[in-house]
Amino acid sequence: MSTESDESLVRRLVGDDPRAGAEVLEAAATSGSVPVLVAAALLSDDTRYLARAAATAVSPRDRQLVALADAQLTGRVDLLDALVRDHLADHPDHLLASWIAGRPL
């Protein structure tokens, strides 16, 4: 993978770049980035990525992102809806959270 930033990679994923999904999964193999690990978990349904993201998350924003992904992966629609509303009220510019909310369960 290139030296592209994790943020740029996640933005490309959210923007439907056809190569971004594979690149996220590749990056997640060695990444400590919570957004990259969360995205990889959602793309692959592999909860090991989510467990790594949870262990890495230190900020409230990152911990909330992990909770959003967990609710999405486990199909808890009502919880996901409530968490997304709260998260986006505090972080309206968080594109990955919006992407999670828009994914089919």
Image (cartoon, rainbow, N blue to C red):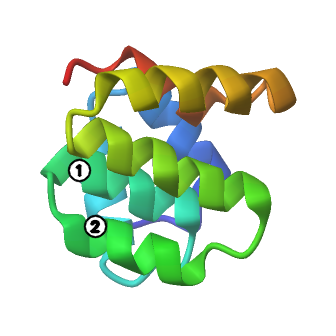
Q: Looking at the image, is 25 positioned above or below residue 99?
A: below
* Residue type for callout 1: Ala
Q: Is residue 53 left or right of residue 72?
A: right
Task: Give the residue at mark 1.
Answer: 22
Q: Secondary structure at mark 1?
A: helix
Percent coordinates x, y for residue 100 in the rendering: 43, 30
- Locate residue 19 relative to residue 10 in the image: left or right: left
In this rendering, position of residue 23 left or right of residue 65? left
Q: How much space separates mark 1 and mark 2, taking CA atoms?
A: 6 Å
- Can you tell which mark lies on residue 67? none
Whole-percent x, y for residue 93 in the image: 78, 25
Residue displayed at 23% across by 75% down:
48
Q: Quadrant of residue 82?
A: top right
Asked whether the beta carbons under mark 1 and mark 2 sit within 8 Å of each other, the answer is yes
Residue in front for this viewpoint, 82 or 54: 82
Classify 10 Å Cα crowding around label 2: few (below 14), some (14-19), many (20 and above).
Answer: some
Residue at the spot of label 2: 26
What residue sits 15% from the left and 52% below the top?
A: 44
**Helix, strand or loop under label 2:** helix
Left or right, residue 54 beside residue 71: right
Q: Who is closer to the viewer here, 22 or 54? A: 54
Determine which quarter of the picture holds residue 104: top left
The residue depicted at 63 percent of the width and 73 percent of the height is: 57
